[in-house]
Image (cartoon, rainbow, N blue to C red):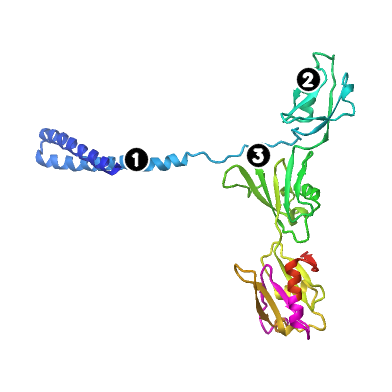
Amino acid sequence: MNLRCGKDRAAQMRMSMDQNAQGLASRHPCGQKARSMIVSRLMALGLASAGVISGSSAQSPAVAASNEPKATCDNQIRSTYLLGPDDQLDISGLELSDLSNKPVRIDGEGDVEVPLAGRVHVAGLTVQQTERDLDKVLTKYIRNPQVVVNVAEVRSQPVSVLGAVNSPGVHQVQGHKTVLEMLASAGGVRQDAGYSIRITRQLEWGCIPLPAAQFDASGKFSVAEVNLRKIMDAKTPEENIQIFPHDVISVPKAEMVYVIGEVHRSGGFVLGEHKSISVLQALSLAEGLNSGADPRHAKILRLKADADQREELKVDVKDALNGKKPDFPLQGEDILFIPGSTGKKAALRSLEAAIQTGTSLAIWRVP
């Protein structure tokens, strides 16, 4: 449709320019020759104008698309605790003896019942703001009231801590809490926890203040990852950010490699930030071979893609130790089995069963 309109406009412009050129040529001393030159120049200008018109019509949808609203972040930071429904408050002051030692619950609408003042809305306020509002209301009945408010029990500021922690679930924020403090509230991370922690935050609490923070697909949440090892070692303490209500902290289970059989310290070893380690590195973590080991018949049990079964890969650990063969890389969830001189198959199957059930197997974190 736009192309046809462009052609019609160009034809009209050519007719108009031809008429104008005839008028100009009739007055020009060179006559017909001048007419041809003028028509050629006006035609070039007309085609260029038609191209601009059609081009602008074709580009208008793209311009409109660029004006679509995008997720933005107002960087709102709420550094003090905000009261909410189900919080329990201790309120004391002159003429408020009826409330002494009787915590007052904030109801579902965010109000509290206070003698003389009646129902007062306090949800969304800090403790200091609540004290000022109560003083203002009670001034009508009490000269110079001095209300004191304390939070007896927190109910309305939940943070979900999920994944490889000792006490996963919903925990309450009270005051200023950082990532490490919330993990401590959840009983700390498990031995099999990974080092990359994912934090998801509702935009009403502002964006996560980290350079790598991004919006999720819906544009309603800010998402970022922090490195647990780095914030615990104080290498990047700025990543130990403050946690706000309704944040979700996800601690994924780490990928591990398992070394079992005739080694000094068998078990699972957390890979952490490393995607793979070699057979010799895994043996080093397992503190070496026992005297009864048969390193020439070692095996790697590796999960097949999209399957629960494992394939066996033979590896000659003795040649690798002597430098006769290259070291072999291990992947996440690989099992390195070092057999002894007898009972190879029975030991292999029993240890594999222990790994699958998650019992009777120590887990070690790589230092």
Question: Which secondary structure lies at badge 1?
Answer: helix
Inter-mark Cα distance, 3 to 2: 34 Å
Is residue 269 positioned above or below 52 on the image?
below
Q: Nearer the viewer, mark 1 or mark 2?
A: 2
Going by the numbered disc 1, the residue's amino acid type is Ser
For label 2, the crowd category at 10 Å Cα-Cα, with few meaning under 14, some 14 to 19 and many 20 or more, is: few
Is residue 59 visible to us here?
A: yes
Going by the numbered disc 2, the residue's amino acid type is Gly
Name the one closer to the observer, 90 or 34. 90
Res 57 label: 1
Labels 1 and 2: the sequence-earlier one? 1
Inter-mark Cα distance, 1 to 2: 64 Å
Going by the numbered disc 3, the residue's amino acid type is Gly
Q: Disc 1, disc 2: CB below 8 Å?
A: no
Asked if the stretch drawn in magenta spans residue 105, the answer is: no
Question: Which secondary structure lies at badge 2?
Answer: strand
- Residue 120 at x, y percent in the picture: 76, 23
Asked if the stretch drawn in magenta spans residue 329, the answer is: yes
- Residue 223 at x, y percent in the picture: 64, 48
Question: Which secondary structure lies at badge 3?
Answer: loop
The quarter of the picture where residue 11 lies is top left
For label 3, the crowd category at 10 Å Cα-Cα, with few meaning under 14, some 14 to 19 and many 20 or more, is: some
The residue pinned by badge 2 equals 118
